[in-house]
Amino acid sequence: MTEPVPEAPHSIGAFVRGYEEEQRLRGFRCPACGHVTATWGLACARCGHAGLAEFALGTTGRVVARTVIAVSADEFLNDTPYAYVVVELDGGGRATGWVPSIRAETDLPIGTRVRFRPSYKPGVQFEKEPA
Amino acid sequence: MREAWVVGAASNRFGKMAETAREAATRVGLEAIRSAGLEPKDIGYTFVANCFGISEHQAHVGPLINNGLGIPSVPSVSLESACSSSSAALHEAFVHVAGGFADAALVIGAERLSHLDTLAATSYFAIAADYPYETKNGATFPGLYATLASAYAAEYRTTPEMFGAIAIKNHANAARNPHAHFQKELSMSTYLASPMVAAPLRLYDCCPFSDGAAAVVVAAKEFVRSPATEPLVIRASARAGAVTDMHDRPDLLGLPSTRRAAELAFRQAHLAPKDVDFLEVHDCFTIAEALALEDLGFFPKGTAARESAEGVTARDGRLPVNPSGGLKAKGHPVSATGASQVVEIFEQVNGRATGREVPRTETALAHNVGATGGSCSVHIFSRR
């Protein structure tokens, strides 16, 4: 008997609905190695374990890398310039997102604290945490 | 496994093509076959890369190319591995020839992008990232490499001038390459004054959107025919993958797929970086050239941009890198890029790289990355 293929706890569409409509960031946690990720899969990209668990990603964190995009693709045409960010989330894992109204790298130094801001605009939007 | 050889190679001029990708692919394919002293009927398999063919309303272009070459019964297949599509095609040709499934195989990469405006081209390029997790969050292709550049600059305290030196060196090489899109030198003041595309990447850190086509013929030893041509033996043909999403990478200071493919390639070839005389590496952005040289094992982490600024990677330096001008200045017609790296190596070895010759041409390495490192090919070639 072959082992049954595991179900993912949620779909990519459910991840998108999560940040668009439910004010939450849905992720996965590997029960074998503890790796936390936002990215959909049936097995852990870090250790290969099949069968991931639902994990509520933190909505606050720290910018670990960023760029300020002046020339965007079509969906962000009216939002340039903005920062594209990789955020180390409180509680584990990292997420990709964007921060509107950032004009230069100095406006958003690496290490800046940010929080998820639900928005009618596309994507996972973050904003600087108030000081 | 038997030896597989590069016996012929050809490229058109990168930039803006009047022809469709299909037409250009067929033309350079025939030129590559002829450069090997062969005829189309000698080809047993055609491997095609044309990943944005859909923008020209054409998929399944392989049979059309073979029809145009007069060999409609020869099998073909299209491969898509983003910017590493034609090195993936080369790998398949290697596997087929080395494994005895074909005696001679044609590898063609072709792309036409000039019919798209910047917005459309940027949008097409962005879909090679993880669409729901990266592109929908505002990522662009320059933006993703800029993210790596920002992490690199923060870790290693590099200056814009160090990356400018990479761009200037590649422009100087392309100025001497008749296949190149940009056949002009670049000054540091022009580099520094160019607008930010995705900070810290300026316009002149970025490769252009180019049209172009390049082709390579891979064959078994008995197909080494042309007495006028020095063939190259493929010492290694290795590919690797890695986590794509920026937020899931163990670190942002290199491309794990490059490290893995290089490790496999050097092991296959029984060679080490010190044995390589010159390289063609994947410099879609200046940061990518620095990362490539470190991940391939030629420089310690954090030092390649500094060394480039010292002239180490110039044509007359200790380790010439991208004598063709690289993606940065020769141009980056996505699917043609991997094959065109081999064209440059073939021309250098055959004394046809007039005006941009590198001093030693015994052994060369080609490194080609798919998008932001989800795929990578490393090939090593030597003279017979």
Image (cartoon, rainbow, N blue to C red):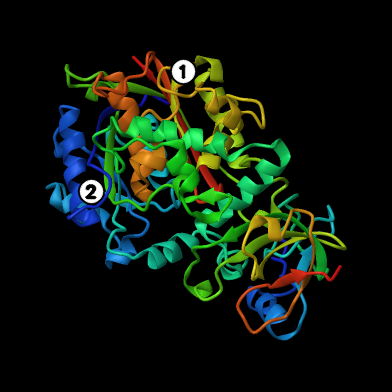
Label 2, secondary structure: give it: helix
| Chain letter for mark 2 | B
Q: Position of residue B371 (x, y in %)?
A: 50, 51
Relative to B109, B380 lies left or right: right
The residue carrying mark 1 is B317
Q: Where is residue B299 in the image (x, y as percent from the top left)?
A: 61, 25
x and y, in percent, of residue A116 in the image: 76, 73
Q: Which disc is residue B110 wearing?
A: none
- Towards the viewer: B323 or B47: B323
Task: Give me the C-alpha separation between circle 2 and circle 1.
Answer: 34 Å
Question: Is B353 or B183 nearer to us in this picture?
Answer: B183
**Side of B213 where B370 appears, left or right:** right
| Label placed on residue B25 | 2
Report the amino acid beneath label 2.
Answer: Ala
**Three-letter code for the amino acid on which mark 1 is drawn:** Gly
Classify the position of the N terminus of chain B by image quarter: top left
Q: Quadrant of residue B89?
A: top left
In this orientation, which residue lies closer to the viewer: B287 or B232? B287
Q: For numbered disc 1, what is the local secondary structure? A: loop
* Residue B276 in sight here: yes
In-image side of B351 versus A90 (left or right): left
The answer to whether residue B324 shows anywhere in this view is no
Residue at 54% x, 15% y is B274
